[in-house]
Amino acid sequence: MAEENRFKDLPSRYDPSKVESGIYQIWEKAGYFNADRDSYRRPYTIVIPPPNVTGILHMGHALNNTYQDILIRYHRMLGYNALWMPGTDHAGIATQNVVERKLAKQGLRRQDLGREKFVQEVWNWKEEYGSTIIRQLKRLGASCDWRRLRFTMDSDYSLAVRYVFVHLYKKGLIYQGNYIINWCPRCHTALADEEAPKKETQGKLYYVRYPIKDRKEEFIVVATTRPETILGDTAVAVNPGDKRYKDLVGKKVILPIINREIPIIADDYVDPEFGTGAVKITPAHDPDDFWVGKRHNLDAPVVIDSEGKMTDLAGPYKGLDRFECRKQIISDLQRLGLVEKIEDYIHNVGHCYRCDTVIEPYLSRQWFVKMKPLAEPAIKAVKEGRIRFIPSRWTKVYLNWMENIQDWCISRQIWWGHRIPVWYCVDKGGNRTDCPPIVEMEDPKVCPNCGNTNLVQDGDVLDTWFSSWLWPFATFYWPKDDPDVKADLEYFYPTNTLVTAPEILFFWVARMIMAGLEFMGEIPFSDVYLHGTVRDDTGRKMSKSLGNIIDPLEIIEEMGADALRFSLISITAVGQDVYLSRSKFELGRNFTNKIWNATRYILSHLLPEVRDTDWEKGLLTLEDRWILDCLSQTIEKVNDALKNYRFNESANLLYDFFWHQFCDWYIEATKIDRGKEIKVNQQKILLYVLEHFLRLLHPFMPFITEEIYQRLKEVMNLSGQTIMLMPYPQEGGRKDPGARQRFELVKSLIYHLRNMRTQVSLRPSDRPDVLLSGPKAREVLESVELVRFLARVGKVEEIEEGKRPSESLAGVLPGLEFFLVLSGLVDVRREKERVRQQIQETQNAIEKKELLLSNANFTNRAPKNVVEEERRKLEELRDTLKRLEALYDDLKGD
RNA sequence: GGGCGGUUAGCUCAGUUGGUUAGAGCGUCUGACUUACAUUCAGAAGGCCAGAGGUUCGAGUCCUCUACCGCCCACCA
């Protein structure tokens, strides 16, 4: 028959490369990922954490986007109007760095091009390479509504950024000020605190003697890790309660080398226990010293410039690199006898999160956002449970950060980004006049204060996160005054779930919550699922510089996106980091292959009578009833796990059901020859279970499930053009606890018989008889074919209780004795010993149970069902013991 | 210095509110080409659940302390 042959030709290996791109096209063409307003359906919205345009898909993305895709497909299949909003982030510093590196290859610096040309160059780069990550997300199977793709520098998006700046400025929440900020001398820009993580660094602690003025040969010794900043010192501070220095406060010391006189001051900030209890104060080069300087009205001479080189004020060291200067100054001080000692010292030093250069605390004029007023409602939203974190432990981390939030430095001295919408009135010489800065939605032409038309825009751009924090609503074209935009927002906002890595909890998540509440008056999302970090199998973060990355695209090439997705999900516990190695993906690959082959088997054996899955209830065998029950349970459990973000659990449930229940037991059982009527019915059930399973698995493995679904359409009536609906627990439809129990008994009998076979090394072709006795024997006999076929035994018959056949191996299950008849193969002594051991074990178990049940505390306090269950088990054990003892007595006679 | 996570089989890890005999994958060992799958099948071995105390009728699960590993935050130069 031609039809059957068609399926017999299916290859015995699943080949993802042949199907994945085609499948994706089917979905896109059908527009299944698109979501538009629909007043009849409930929306379910996820916004993608926009990857950097410079990004290429790494395992972190793969994990993150698989979670999101599972959620979005799952909800789409539940009937929600599911929108997954995609996009990319302009990633200021990162992207600028990439383009600068490209220019450097041509021997150019960005300054050679000038601002405008350089920015154009970045746009060109973006047009050419910016969609790489999007293509890669599609290969992963991400089912975003791609029509809505946004970029944080789209003109509409820029409008939102500008609106927000103006709004906050007018509200008095944005201000400009001279402060110490984190400066990256390589990227040449200010960085927010979060962008300059502290790293433990091996350094030295230098103890330097500062001569005290008017006191010969007397010194005050200060400890410093950065002797080059000595040149910028304007005081030495001690703790006011420190007796050692009491009489020195108010005196002066001579700053070595440049011989400047500076005062000794008292300030609580100094910890008398540390170092010598005396601290040099360098207001321009240390954030703490800066505040000490403010309190004491000290000068703040800048001795290190934006390049990390010493300034004019550094006298003899002018022009030296900061680290070079450090060496130099120490050797000079040593020559002068002013270095008391040098100790090895491990301390925390800020590093640029983009290029890892050591951060220089730098005094400069920057723009800041006052965060306290924004943080308050965001704290409240979480405390009141309107936003929840999964796992919940992140709540505390979030609250702790929010309650101690610092103002946010939002200006960056780079060219790629949203230009700060601030104009200054300048005179003909280009110097700022006294007029206040101009901050409006429209570009100003004249100064509203003095009528001057000579205006210049602030040269800085905004921190990338100043645009990202608007993502959940700016992607919908907010704040455009347009009924469509408003309706869209009202329908899709707030979004449901944010899936992200904890690394950007402060960068992004917290700020989105603040922005949502400030500008929309509503939380941006209700659930935040924070997944772990992807590491290599030795626990290091995967990073290009470490060379330990596993490229997800390579895995997709080799094993398929489904294998990648399933493996990742299955091995990553909720909120835990995941340690990866190449071989771990074999789990998913083997699973795809198993699914493929089971399908191949089912389809290629299909009888022509099988045209649908309408199986008949009257023809159900025990195994049929059992697998339907099992399916039903699995549907229920998977739905439950998914609703609670227990992704790994749901993946493992699916794996176990398909492999170890459906394939290992049910498919095997259907190979039993039981006549045409039942065979047809069972084939319908095979298709039925397979089809339900595919739909249940679809969010995890979208490609193979769709591929098979398309083939199933050829043999059965399926309503959907593609996979559309999630099976509901009721739909699986066939809870059958009775069948479950009976089948479990049969399974465990088969299991014991197989075990006995290996004990005596039977060959597969040997088919010994089995005898049964006990109250449960009848039940088993009803399904005798199962036992015969799956345990590979001959006749199975009931015998009278207590009549043990000689020459057999015997076993006891609750309510059942069974005997594997093996003439000439039974070693009676060994057999006696085996039974004796079982008796011993059973007796021990009984004793334990009796003890437990005689404890009034237990029977009174434990829940009734637990106590009853224990009683039942005790009865079972006693029954088993009785049967074992009878067996043992019989053996004695042999 | 504060906070968080981890410590369960040889390895990598699950274990939802405390309640059967603590599970999986890989690896190891024994067998098997049993009409889909050797990316397979049938079986086996292997655990003082880091340590100590506590709460409880009952603890891998809750509490306290300790040890080691990892992460995050923090203005001790």
Image (tube, rainbow, N blue to C red):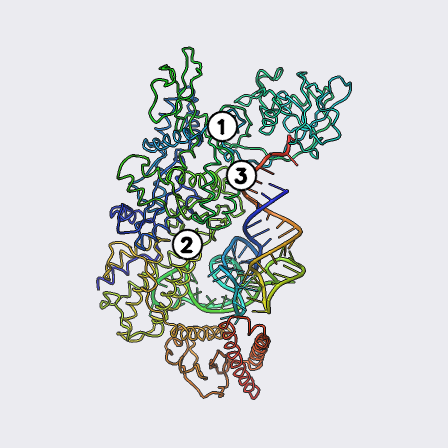
Q: Amino acid at mark 1?
A: Ala
Left or right for A888, reference A724: right
A534 w.r.t. B45: above or below: above
How far apart, in angstroms, are the residues tagged by discs 3 and 2?
44 Å
* Drawn side of residue A770 relative to residue B45, left or right: left
| Residue named by callout 2 | A588
How far is the residue under mark 3 from the one under mark 1? 21 Å
Residue type at numbered disc 3: Asn
Q: Is residue A792 left or right of residue A886?
A: left
Describe the element under mark 1 as helix, strand or loop: strand
Which amino acid type is shown beneath numbered disc 2? Gly
Q: Are marks 3 and 1 in contact (CB under 8 Å)?
A: no
As drawn, the label of residue A755 is none
The answer to whether any part of residue A113 appears in the image is no
Q: Which residue is mark 3?
A: A404
Mark toward the viewer: 3 or 1 = 3
Same chain shared by disc 3 and disc 1? yes
- For disc 3, the neighbor class at 10 Å (few under 14, some 14 to 19, many from 20) is few
Nearer the observer, A473 or A768: A473
Q: Are marks 2 and 1 in contact (CB under 8 Å)?
A: no
Residue under circle 1?
Answer: A190
Query: Does label 1 lie on the same chain as label 2?
Result: yes
Give the mark nearer the N terminus: 3 vs 1. Answer: 1
Within-10-Å neighbours for mark 1: few <14, some 14–19, many 20+: many
Image-quadrant location for residue A323: top right
User: Does A394 appear above or below A666?
Assistant: above
